[in-house]
Amino acid sequence: MISTAIRLARVGSGSELAAAAVLGLGYPCIMLAALIPNLWFFAAAVAATYLADQHLHQRGSYLVNRLGKVRAGLSIRFLVRQLLLILLLARMELAEQTIFYVTIAGLLLFYALQAPHGALVTLIRLRRRMPVVTRNIDLSMLRIPAAPPRRLLNRSAEKMLHLDVFAVVGVLAAVESGRSAFGYAGLALTLVLAIAYVAALLPFTRRGRRVPPVNTVLEGIDGWLRDYRPTTVLYFSGSRESAYQVNMWLDTMKQLDGRPLIILRERHIVPQLGPTSVPVICVPSATHLMNMDLSTVRVALYAANVGKNIHMLRIPTMKHVFIGHGDSDKVASINPYSKVYDEVWSAGRAGRDRYALADVGVRDEDIVEVGRPQLAPIQTWGGTPKNPVPTVLYAPTWEGWDDNPGNTSLLLAGENIVRRLLEAREPVRVLYKPHPFTGTRSPQAKAVHERITAMVEKAATERATDPRWAQESSALRAEQSAARAELARIEARLGELGADGNGKTRAGKDEAETSRDALPDLAREAELATLGDEWNAAYWRSFGWWEHRVVTGAEPRLYDCFNESDGMVSDISSVVSDFIASGKPYAVTDSAELGAEEFKKQNTAVRAAVILSNDAQQLGELLAAITGGEGADTLAEDRRELKEYLLGPDEPASIVQFNDAVRALAAKSEARNLGVAQRTGVEVAVTAADPSDSAPEATGLDTTVAG
């Protein structure tokens, strides 16, 4: 019942729900205490609302925003509490005494100080906001000043309003003791602290503490671009939940020949970007992007089909390529929008055939097979489970933008799949890793996800107390304790490096200061990569190989879950295509109930899969393939053939194929630009830009229109 209430209230924990209940009941209690009047009842209710308010703000609760939407925002809550304090004084027959009028005057002055405080905070934030956010770019030419101390601006309105606690305590003490001096002292302390807070903000409004003007910043970025001369750009726009789509390409961009650059369009993606030494520019404004000097770029890579792509696609001097963020049989993999690109790159032959069958206007000659460089970390299967208890990963995709039952197995089959795995005759360990978008559109999908999470966690708790695992648990206790200590050490070191558990930069500075200080540091990047691998290894050792687990968030990574599992259940998505690289048995759910033959006909990736109906009765076939030994895995050869068809050949390596494709397309771009320049009579000064040349002096096509 409590979990249902938490879900309906959209709060993250029971403590948030309790704090909300305290706020809801606390204010009527304050009013009742003021009317009775009862000083101690009033004080207790006031204290409870202060603490509840502070807890919700510390947790960043969704309710804080919702309260503001229903006219119960932060300022209103404090004002009401202060008005009820005045009511208490009146009901206790103090309305004719000086303390009554001084309290009113003091609280009015306190509220008068809210305006300059709020104005200064807003002004400082606006003047610290740059038109771009960068990583790994030297912005020393801009002379960006240090940000104000975080304690001044973080949750500033809450901090300012909470200064009234001294006035409230002082006045209540004056009422209880009959000594007005307590009230005057409390009110004075509140006003002095409020004035000091405002005064502390003033120095940061001076010209020397502001970031440079917009034009100066943009000119500085253009100057850097002219010096760096980027040749290949990874362009990305998307929601907060879609950051994984760009993160999956970071290692590939780092390994490219030439001078890579990453261009983002939304500020919220920058803090979620994984560690990389590749230069990053986030340009929210289309106007700023379209005026940016990208004349040396010859190849632009697009990880998603989104409307903002048009702001880059309009540049004719570079070739545009859709690389996507996965290879699957989803409709997204044959999007007619792909016609706008010069080329579409697919992992293997399957991508080419999909477009041919779909007939959406993408020409066969514009499709290039480049493999999947991201799949290098996936380990191939040895043919038997790695632990005495086999591990099955359930990794459903999300519900999609419509209600097509074929989008995800979660809604119709998810609970059946997990239940059958948990209740299998021979013990199975379940890893449940849902898609990051799960539940973002469909409340039903979110509810099913929560029920599955509860099922897995309950089963994990029951297995922890099962005598069958007591001996193993005892034997591994020391190793698990050491692994947890190792995790703590790694996370502490990540903290020292200014990164969280995912290796991403922590929010501590504002965007301007972070852009100024986030310079390339290859040693730091290498250490973060090593720590990430060590963290992953320690994570899996920190609990038993028989323990069920719900895995959400960026860590452990999906491919780490692949390596830990012996088989997988999923849906039609790139997850299946990627998992095929491991060679392990897998199952895919026919949620739309097309029938096995039609399902295989429509979806290439399931041709070597165990096909599940929504009741998941066929899971036994998957478990037999994982554990049955020689002859039980009847689809092994089909998986080998399908792997090459979907993902391309193992040799040459995918990164080599990808690099060759970039080089070839860059040459086409150079040829096109030279031809256009010659036909239009433009004076051309050409220094052929070899994408493999990473020297800053290497130039691209430099065209100057004759006067």
Image (spheres, rainbow, N blue to C red):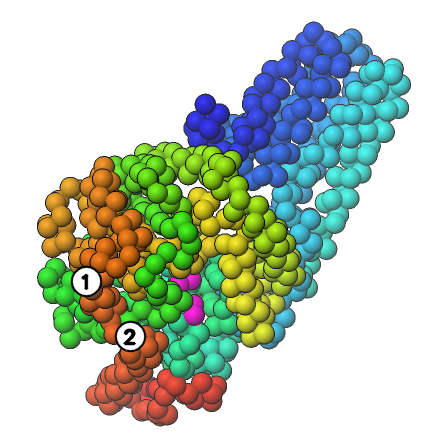
Residue at 69% from the left image edge and 59% from the top image edge: 206
Please, what is the three-letter code of the amino acid marked with disc 1?
A: Asp
Please, what is the three-letter code of the amino acid marked with disc 2?
A: Asp
> Which structural element holds mark 1?
helix
Residue at 59% from the left image edge and 18% from the top image edge: 25
Q: Position of residue 123 (x, y in %)?
A: 61, 51
Residue at 62% from the left image edge and 55% from the top image edge: 482
Can residue 372 be seen by looking at this rendering? yes
> Is residue 258 toward the left or the right of residue 639 in the image?
right
The residue lying toward the viewer, choosing from 109 and 141, is 141
Tell me the number on the disc at residue 638: 1
Of circles 2 and 1, which is in front?
1
Q: Quadrant of the C terminus?
A: bottom left
The residue lying toward the viewer, choosing from 472 and 220, is 472
Q: Residues within 10 Å of mark 2 (few under 14, many from 20)?
A: few
- Name the residue carrying label 2: 650
